[in-house]
Amino acid sequence: MADTGLLESLLRLLEKVDGGTDSQDVAADLGVDHQVIVGAVKSLQALGEVISAEQKSSKHWELTGEGREIAEQGSHEARVFNAIPDEGLPQNQLMKMPSGKVGFSKAMSNKWIRLDKAHEGGPRVFKTVETIEDAVRDKLQLVQKGQSAKLEDKEKNELKKRKLLSEVTVKSYWITKGSSFSTTITKQETELTPEMIASGSWKEKKFKPYNFEAMGVAPDCGHLHPLMKVRTQFRQIFLEMGFTEMPTNNFIESSFWNFDSLFQPQQHPARDQHDTFFISDPALAQQFPQDYLERVKKVHSEGGYGSQGYKYDWKIEEAQKNLLRTHTTAVSARMLYKLAQQEKFTPVKYFSIDRVFRNETLDATHLAEFHQIEGVVADYGLTLGNLMGILHQFFTKLGITKLRFKPAYNPYTEPSMEVFSYHEGLKKWVEVGNSGVFRPEMLLPMGLPEGVSVIAWGLSLERPTMIKYGINNIRELVGHKVNLQMVYDSPICRLDS
Amino acid sequence: MPTVSVKRDLLFEALGQKYTDEEFDELCFEFGLELDEITSEKEILSREQGDEKAEGASDVVLYKIDVPANRYDLLCLEGLVRGLQVFKEKLEAPRYRRVSPADGGEPQRLLITDETASVRPHAVAAVLRNISFTQERYESFIELQEKLHQNICRKRTLVAIGTHDLDTISGPFTYTAKPPGEIRFKPLNQSKEYTAAELMSLYKTDSHLRHYLHIIENEPLYPVIYDSNGVVLSMPPIINGDHSKISLNTKNIFIECTATDLTKAKTTLDMVVTMFSEYCEEPFTVEEAEVVYPDGRLCVYPELAYRTETLSGDFINKRVGISESAESIAQLLTRMCLRSEVSGEGGLIQVEIPPTRSDVIHACDIMEDAAIAYGFNNIVRSTPRTYTIANQLPLNKLTELLRQDLAAAGFTEALTFALCSEEDIADKLRKNIAETRAVHISNPKTAEFQVARTSLLPGLLKTIAANRKMPLPLKLFEISDVVLKDETKDVGARNNRRLCAVYYNKSPGFEVIHGLLDRVMQLLDVKPGRNQGYHIQAAEDSTFFPGRCAEIFSCGKSIGHLGVLHPDVISRFELTMPCSAIDIDIEPFL
């Protein structure tokens, strides 16, 4: 900040002129360097609308160092002339003068002096005229006084050639009064302080305007993971719909609960080593509800409950094999079995969102583990229309209202339906989930009453999250290769908007 | 889900109607199929092997159609067309008949010997008489066998199909098992004879057959079928003999299926003969064959069994959520190849399940077919009246609440894999794998899936390693499950919900992690203190820097550790800065 005295001098000067003034003139008037005035203009600009200043550039002539010396002491030729007494001067002595060489030849060509080479005692120089007019000095003095306009371009260029003048470009300001012009300076404050509040001085102060274009300072905070934010929303949706959360904190499951209890035959491809992670330690499950296990064995191998069964040799060894659960439906089976053990059946609505594992080929959208979202409703007399109705309500909460259903196959549901929604962006129907009615061969051996239907549906948590947050590679979302910046930057999750 | 590839023009010709791609896609959707891809041989070749190889390949349009895994009757053009035509009521479902040989001849007979019992004990057989093949029909016949092999036959482990030109062989046939050295024949498309042992090494490099060798490779006896002159028909489940191979000109086909699962063998045989008897002189008839078991029991195949189920229209209506008359439901079912009639009182429907619909094993399957024929998307959607009160799982509720507050405390949530390498949870943490109580996976494809994690720490450290470009400090947390062996559980293992957090910066920041512990305890309403509260005390743990580790106790019970990580742990996770961490079990706070 330039000192207030200078600023006020500048303002007083500006008050007197109409239509404004050039900062160079101000510098000349106040007798300070132009750069100081430039600083003052900037300070005044920062105060708001006190002045307005427009930058401009102008060219002007300036003396070089040698030019200033000549303006003071005369041109070299004049200095040579003045050094010569009436009786003349030996040439070698004259040449020793600072201006000797240049001055001698110029004075000679001006015919101010002559050289007597034949003089005894060596060549000697004599004046040829009484007085001279030092035109170079006069011209330079004109420039020095800022009257370079009086010289002709030819003369200026001649002097420029002799390196006595140079042309310089000056950036200056054209200063005019601003809308809140005043000749006194009020210093602007940057921030409100406790002292100002206490003293009330803020009332008189002017505050420096903020730059609202700049970004704020990022808050120092932690962040929740986007997939978990979406999980929270799905949990919320199920809770809003009256669904109770199932205990899915058991990644290790027996083939019995993961497959057999779901009426999935032991030769089913999903039970292949290629699709499922089996456990080598602890390799086998040891305890099963024995009666129930017998009923499961029977319905697989012989049928019953109105079913033909699969008619194959069901083996306990196959059912004992431990694995990483391939779906949370294994937990649904445990829960439905538990429900069937109640003295009296009560309707239930269950949900879960947790990890499942597949020994599959990995790509940009598939990992060996992912989160399955599952909903289950058990009650007397539930229909396929009910399943569609509840799916409609569930997906409406996700902001998806256009649904249609395709017949599909699933070993433990009949009917089975793939759920498609119309994607406005892609202009086509895309699969968004799977659903169905659990088979009687699964429910009746558990001991559920005959008239009870169980409807269920499932989808992955990762897919809607990738769509929601515009992520193409699942590794950027799940696992240690996550992009933390993405986590930091991810917005809150509202699935219906 | 199996995919069937059919020539579009051939399909439309058989359907007697041309469709646009969209119309056909719509028909598939309604019927439960999926038009997966529209392509051509040329396009497939060019995609898989480059444009040069595709030069000159056929550019006839192919439809690739996804078929439900239990609908073996839709695995070929013939079956698809039949199913769709009946669905559109343009065709009545044919009735498949087993017939005796013409002119009172003896049926073909297949004798099973005792030796097969140990390797592949079952066999069924049938004959297709006076069939007329065209190039397309022949290709479809071969392709159907391949599809059946891949699906119901479980890559030939359960069932293997052999088809033979009956006019080149003479019955009775013998299905037996012999040591590999004693079996010798010229296999399909080879020019000389090999022993079974030689064949097994010959096919080691065969891109197709090598996948089936393991089925019998280690058996002392290999299955083999001979005719009455000692000609080898086939060595199931690997290869047929060249002698009896079928061609475009074959008129009479002998079909045998050998199996480890008799039910599947019968179904497979039924599928082959129902699909292709269409081209017999008398369509949809199949000549019987007799199979004689070692105990003298005689069975006649193919079974081609029709079964009748009786159910009420009310049952269908109530399960689907519609109200149709019994007559109308019978009509819907008939369109699904389940010929149905209303009979007698109370609107009972007699539903006939044909041999092609082995997938129908319960009334619920019939109910589904009625719903499909009615149109899933014509069913009125209604909300069930089931009234329930929602409950959160207490463990998840606690997790959700803690997550929010850990983020509020300045830590960012990570989401790491539950599976990892042994190295991650042992060597890298300076622990012995035997001490970890880890659950081990028997069939991991890569080292990334050797074990279920026993700690959340490796995942967090790997997350930091992958994000070293981010500004310091890095403060991460995760609340999730680890898996530990536990003999008290039915499966021998249990999950354990853990809270883990790390602080990674130029200085270790023990006080930051310690402060986080204090904050977590404050949130859990546990006061500092020795008995009823929580406290930490110096401990030795190989993962941590000596003298910089403490064990955390809450109400006198150890719940975890905190401290500055051992420099070796830091470098083994490819990190360069000091790091402190906390790892606690949150289940005691439920």
Image (spheres, coloured by chain):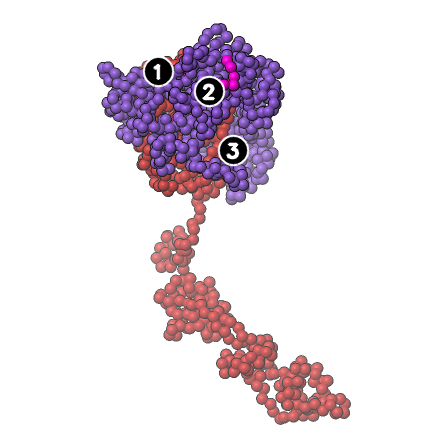
Residue B11 part of the magenta-drawn span = no
**Residue shown at 55% from the left, 22% from the top:** B242
Res A310 quadrant in image = top left
> Measured along the vertical axis of the image, is residue A128 above or below residue A434?
below
The answer to whether any part of residue A135 appears in the image is: yes
Name the residue type under label 3. Gly
Residue linked to disc 1: B307
Foreground: disc 1 or disc 3: 1
Q: Nearer the viewer, residue B208 or B346?
A: B208
Chain A, hue in figure = red
| Residue B252's disc number | 2
**Residue shown at 48% from the left, 26% from the top:** B248
> In the image, are marks 1 and 3 on the same chain?
yes
Residue B529 x/y as whole percent: 47, 28
Disc with the residue nearer the chain's start (2 vs 3): 2
| Residue B459's disc number | 3
Gap between marks 1 and 3, in whole Å?
57 Å
Chain B, hue in figure = purple
Are discs 1 and 3 less than 8 Å apart at CB? no
Q: Nearer the viewer, residue A303 or A476?
A: A303
For the C terminus of chain A, give its image quadrant. top left
In magenta, the rendered stretch is: B167-171
Residue B225 x/y as whole percent: 53, 15
Instruction: Indicate the chain on which mark 3 is placed.
Output: B
Residue A365 x/y as whole percent: 46, 36
Disc with the residue nearer the chain's start (1 vs 3): 1
